[in-house]
Image (cartoon, rainbow, N blue to C red):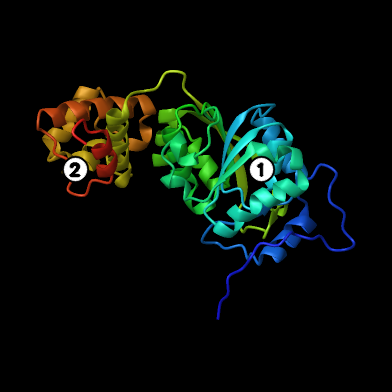
Amino acid sequence: MSSTRRYSTPRLPSDAEPSESGLLGPIEVHAICEALGVRPTKTLGQNFVHDAGTVRRIVRDAGIGEGTQVVEVGPGLGSLTLGLLEAGAWVRAIEIDPVLARALPVTVAQRMPDAAQRLHVVNRDAVQIEGLADFGVDWDAPTHLVANLPYNVAVPLLLSMMESFPSLGYALVMVQAEVADRLAAEPGSRTYGVPSVKAAWYGNANRAGTIGRSVFWPIPNVDSALVSLRRLETPRGDTALRLATFEACDTAFSQRRKTLRAALKNWAGGADNAQELCDRAQVDSSIRGEKLGIEDYVRLGRALLEMRAEGTIPLPAQDRYAKERQAESPSA
């Protein structure tokens, strides 16, 4: 039997005092969860930060200051949100959990009433946010993405935000340590793969530090790390080139241990087509995809667009980028 749960003002235990800054500590996190009837779920990747030092470190490293326009994905109880607001940021927070989305403005109003007007919460799945209009607030365009991303969807969320908001010049996100290694990996390394290439399309990704497990509740069974991504001043290309680059990358890594020619053969419509694609892109077809850098994949993307236009390489039967292609089509 279930009943509708209402948000009531969180109350701390009688022997606890709120921190002077208004940031959330372990007692506050537990108290708010209890008041809301929230049980953190693995499905939504909910692990709440309760260490003020960690929060302030992230805010500082992200370069957040007075008036900075920030997008935060998955604010949860508001630990990082409060840190961002404390630094003077204007925060657009995207929260998929309706209970937490309703509670966050109340928590901020309680703990930092002067900052309440600088917070706007959207109860949506972040991957469905496609532009400024989806926020429904008339603020300046966001310049920073700062978030504790759910581990199970960290990479698609990061890429989705960078694509949806070209104004985002810098991102600092907390992810699973293994994911951080993949995003920041260099060609030829053991952890280099599809996430590395796709992040590099947008800018320069770097591992920006380690986060201890003890700063979370519940304590995760994996290590966490920070990844920074600074957007390139000049984009690598338009949407068509991005999709072609990503498609070539996906295919090359789908059979990681094969040479590029062998990995691309079936997708390209034959070994000859795969060889011609590599020749046009000036890429050695005898090496594996893990040896190629982002510039190599961009050249493969350009060559792919040429050969598609000539009718040499068809679109795949199962086109994972069909929706984006359609959206960018002049006839759409």
Q: What element carries label 2?
A: helix
| The quarter of the displayed image where residue 247 is located | top left
Name which residue lies at 50% across and 46% down: 154
Name which residue lies at 67% across and 43% down: 80
294 w.r.t. 233: above or below: below
User: What is the three-letter code of the residue carrying label 2?
Assistant: Trp
Say which residue label 1 marks: 81
Say which residue label 2 marks: 267
Of residues 320 and 188, the one nearer the viewer is 320
* Lower sequence index among marks 2 and 1: 1
Lateral position of residue 191 relative to residue 281, left or right: right
96 w.r.t. 15: above or below: above
Q: Where is residue 205 in the image (x, y as percent from the top left)?
A: 51, 31
Of residues 6 and 76, the one nearer the viewer is 6
Name which residue lies at 75% across and 42% down: 113
User: What is the three-letter code of the residue carrying label 1?
Assistant: Thr
